[in-house]
Every structure is written in C-alpha cells, then in structure tokens.
Amino acid sequence: MDVVIKNGILVNADGKTEMDIGIEAEKIVALGKNLSGRKTIDANGKYLIPGGIDVHTHLETVFGGNQTADDFLSGHLGAIAGGTTSHINFCFPNPGQSLHATLANWQQKVRSKSLIDYGFHLVIREESHLEELPMLLEKGVSSIKCFLAYKDTLQIDEELFFKTVEKAKEHGLLTMVHAENGNIIDYLIKKALANQLISPIFHARTRPPELESQSIHFAASVASMLNAPLYIVHVSSIKGLEEIRRAKERGTDLWAETCPQYLFFTEADLERKGHTPGLEHFEGAKWICSPPLRKQEDQMALWEGLRLGLIDVVSTDHCSFHFSSQKTRGLSDFSKIPNGVPGIEERMALLFHYGCNQRNLPMERFVSLTAEIPAFLFGLEGQKGRLAEGYDADIVLWNPNKRQILSVDSHHIQLDYNLYEGFTIEGGAEMVMLRGKIIYANGQFSVEQGNGKYLFRSSYKHSLNHDAKS
Ligand code: URP
Ligand code: ZN
Ligand code: ZN
C-alpha cells in the first residue's frame, strides 16, 4: 500500500472504531489492524473522518446582480482549511440560456481553478428547461433547484414547480427548493420601503417565518402528491421545521438542510452596531441572507432537529459579499443589500465544537450530517462520504484539541469580514487528504490549481426509510 494511517479513531455515520486505513493510488483499499505501507501517518489522538461535502455553495456566482467575493480558488482554499474536500455549486442559467450551455459555462469557470472535487446543481428558471431534464444524468447532474422566492428574477410559479418535480422524478433527479413565498415578500418589501423602513432589520421583518412554512407546506404537498423526492434547502425556523416533521411523518420522501448561520445568529444580529466609521448602524448587513435569521427559539429547535434526525444535512449556502464595497449597496434600501453569508471554511469546526463538544452531538451524527447523507442524496454513494474500502481516500485527520479563533485575519476565503469573528473553537482539520493526496497539513497547502475533479453523480435513490440514513 502507498500509505497507511495508523492509531486514529475512524468515524463513520454508523460507528467509530480504532482502525488503520490503507490507501493505494486514490482509494481506500484496506481497513484493519497492523496494516503496513510504504509511508505511515500517525493519527494518535485524532479522529479520521470522511472529507466534508458541502452541497450548497455559491462560488463565483453573480447573484442579484452582484459578483460573489469568493471564486472557486478562494472558496476551495477555505474549504480545505476547514476539512471540506467536495462541494456542489449552483449553476444559474442566464435568462434564455439552456441548461446544457449553462453547465458548459460553469465547467469552464471552475476547471483551471479547482483544488477540491466539485459538482453542479442546475437551477430551473423557465419552462424550456424541462425538456433538458432527461439529459442531465448523462452529464453527471442528479439534482436541480427551484426558487419560490426572489420575485421577478429567479422565482418560478407553482405550475412550473409542479411540472419540474414531476419530470425530475421521472428522470431520477432530486429537486431542491428555496421555500419562501416570494409574492408576499415582494409586497411586504414595497410596503416597508414606502414607509421609509430601510435598515437591515427590515429584511427579517419582511420575510416572516410563516412565509417559509407555508411555502415548505406547498412544496412538500407537491412532492407527496407526486410521490417524488424533495430537498428543502436552508430551513431556518420552528414553523418550517414543523412542516418538515409533518411531511416526514406522512411518509413523504423529504429531506431537510440547515446552515450554520441559522444555528448561531438571530435577527437581533441585524441590529448590531459596528465600528466601521460611517457604517456603525449598518453592521447588521453582514448577516443578511434569505431566509433571514430568526429568533433564539428557532435556533434551539434547529439544534434539536439535528439531533433527532429531522434535519438531514448541514451545508453552508456560502454566498459571500464584501461588507465595505458590496453590502453597502443597500445603505439606504435594505432590499438592495446582497443576500448571502460565508461559511464554507467554518462549517465543520462550528458543528464539531458547538455540536459534539458542547451539545453531545455524537461524532457519528456529525459525519452523517456533513458527509454521508450529502453523498447519499446527491449521487456520490460508493465514492464519497464514508471511510470504507473502495471509496475515494478523502480523509480528514481531525484534531479535537486544535484551538482556533475564527477571524478575518486568519481565514482563507476572500472576504473583508468573518461572520464568526472571535468564536473560539476546540477542534479542526490538521491534515486533509483528497483522493489519496495530502493537500493540507499543519496549516500548509500542497495542492495545485486544476487538482479538483468533476463529480459525475448518479441518480437519486429513493429511500422509503429515512432511519436507514439518519
Ligand atoms: O441569502 C442567500 N441565501 N443567498 C444565496 C442564494 C440563496 O437563496 O440560496
Ligand atoms: Zn436560497
Ligand atoms: Zn443558496
């Protein structure tokens, strides 16, 4: 064997055990005791976990007319430092653009910059896209996304959503949905602005949780009617979670994701006072994302949802915009503040420290939420998300005692602020291996641009039994 990692505690979603890992070329070829290879890595006192998979990212994207601060290169640097080795980015067609041309365009953007493995979800914007769904699996795309919010830009109507879920099911694709009622949000925004309510907090006040839960209810009902799978992105509220619970109890093939920002912040953060001269009252813009941040009780319910298996995935919705030059576009109109927050670098550490260390979230569940279920849902089973023979050797040597203070001064993404500034974390990635190659160790990167491989993903597999993967 090329490499053997010894003495670590190997963690998969279904258990942890002390075991050596044998690696040859890009794959895990053996798990056992007393393995030997040409090179040995000592993982004493460390966990060995599958490389993180972040299935909700917006790198190198123009969103709402604003170019994200992170491109594929800076996003991948952050991902690696945080223990993430694969991600799936959203591809947005321009109006009138085919899915085929969109995918080709995004492949081109990422190819020369990639450091980690990447896949794409395609966003459905218009009726003509439905004709292309039958071809997506041939291109390695097994998931699509619909927006029920962002009126007059990305939002599609109920009929197109229904037809999309129907056809996606027919062709083995998983539909993802941003569930908020965009029509009523649009009305509430106009009303707020007409009343000179312009500051960041009104972003939250014009997107109440009822408009999330009502939209989740609608989307889940469509999935249930069609007996089709559905994945709800970035669930933020108790009310939303209630709809998820009901749909799951009814037996709908429904999956739910939340993101770190909803676990750590509340709408009160939108009213923070900062220290940037002239922008003191505007600090909250850093926390603007959709759905918005909610209340403490929502946060608590989301943590409980992670523990109970109501929430299946923690991804990031990483969509970064600089504070000083981009968020400020909404200084006199909250609706013009670019929507989105970072997280690709911090996701694993935050969930480990505040979940495993502080809330007794089992390590197995941590792995399930960050790697194994994402791999299962998005067509990477047998390849990623698990430390087992035949799988890619995407391995993170996780040091539970690594102390980090999250800061804009030390992060690797390209952003002029860190949402988690000053958070102190016990635990982090000490060494990161992607397909058998060490790409990061002790704070140093050893990876070249173009290293990432396109994730050719297979068809969504219906799972009637959520418990099998929870
Ligand atoms: O505010 C957010 N979430 N921005 C990214 C786009 C989306 O809605 O996922
Ligand atoms: Zn969204
Ligand atoms: Zn998103």
Image (cartoon, rainbow, N blue to C red):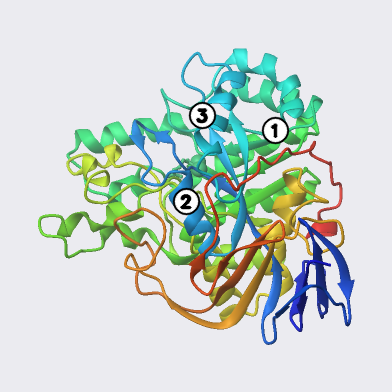
Say whether residue 344 is visible.
Answer: no
Asked which secondary structure carries label 3, the reply is loop
Picture coordinates of residue 350, whole percent (x, y): 52, 69
Marks 2 and 3 sit apart, C-alpha to C-alpha, by 18 Å
The one of 150 and 295 positioned closer to us in this rendering: 150
Crowding near pointer 3: few (<14 within 10 Å), some, many (20+)?
many
Residue at image x 31%, y 36%? 189
Q: Does the residue tagged 3 have its C-beta within 8 Å of any atom of ligand 1?
A: no
Residue 379 is situated, as x and y percent measured from the top left of the image, at 76, 43
**Badge 1 local density, few (<14 within 10 Å), some, or many (20+)?**
many
Badge 1 or badge 3: first in the primary sequence: 3
Q: Is residue 371 above or below residue 253?
A: below
Amino acid type indicated by mark 3? Phe
In three-dimensional space, the C-alpha distance between marks 1 and 3, rounded to whole angstroms, equals 14 Å
Residue 41: image x %, image y %?
71, 77
- Residue 98 spot, x, y in % from top left: 57, 16
Name the residue beneath numbered marker 3.
92
Disc 1 is placed on an element classified as: loop
Question: Disc 2 or disc 3, which is closer to the eye?
Answer: 2
Name which residue lies at 85% across and 77% down: 36
Indicate the amino acid at tag 2: Gly
Q: On the image, numbered disc 1 is attached to which residue?
A: 141
Which quarter of the figure is the C terminus placed in? bottom right
* Image position of 176 (left or right of 150): right
